[in-house]
Image (spheres, rainbow, N blue to C red):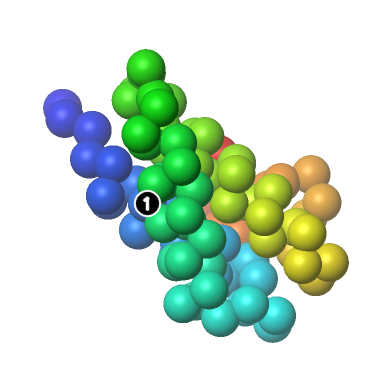
Amino acid sequence: MTFNLDQALLQIVADLSYRYEDSVSREDVRRIVDDARAELESTSRHPEFLAVLIAKQARDALSHHDVPAGDPQGTPAHPGRHLPL
């Protein structure tokens, strides 16, 4: 099984967009995820961890918007899905 970073990032964008839908547009979430990818991918020595690191950096950036974000413990927006968060 091959890991597809692009697919993982699409899922991260979808989940964060859902989680912050009342205060941040999907386009802004996508931009934040893309910015995190650009910053982390260029220096990553372990690409297998990129999705986790990008998701964390994007969540951190979104949390600075001071918006309600569901469960403060970091529960994914879609509890039935298992994401690399």
Q: What secondary structure is marked by label 1?
A: helix
Residue 14 image offset from top left, x and y in percent:
45, 65
Q: Nearer the viewer, residue 18 or 41?
A: 41
What residue occupies the far top of the structure in this picture? Answer: 45
Disc 1 residue type (three-letter): Leu
Check the picture and name the quadrant holding the C terminus. Answer: top right
Q: Residues within 10 Å of mark 1 (few under 14, many from 20)?
A: many
Residue 26 image offset from top left, x and y in percent:
49, 76
Residue 74 image offset from top left, x and y in percent:
71, 46
46 over 55 or under it: above or below? above
Residue 3 image offset from top left, x and y in percent:
23, 33
5 over 2 or under it: above or below? below
Residue 27 in sight here: yes
What residue occupies the far left of the structure in this picture? Answer: 1
Picture residue at 46% right of the left edge, 66% below the top: 31
Q: Nearer the viewer, residue 6 or 31?
A: 31
Q: Nearer the viewer, residue 54 or 35?
A: 35
The residue labelled by disc 1 is: 9
Picture residue at 45% right of the left edge, 36% below the top: 40
Picture residue at 46% right of the left edge, 77% below the top: 27
25 over 38 or under it: above or below? below
Figure disc tally: 1
Picture residue at 15% right of the left edge, 27% below the top: 1
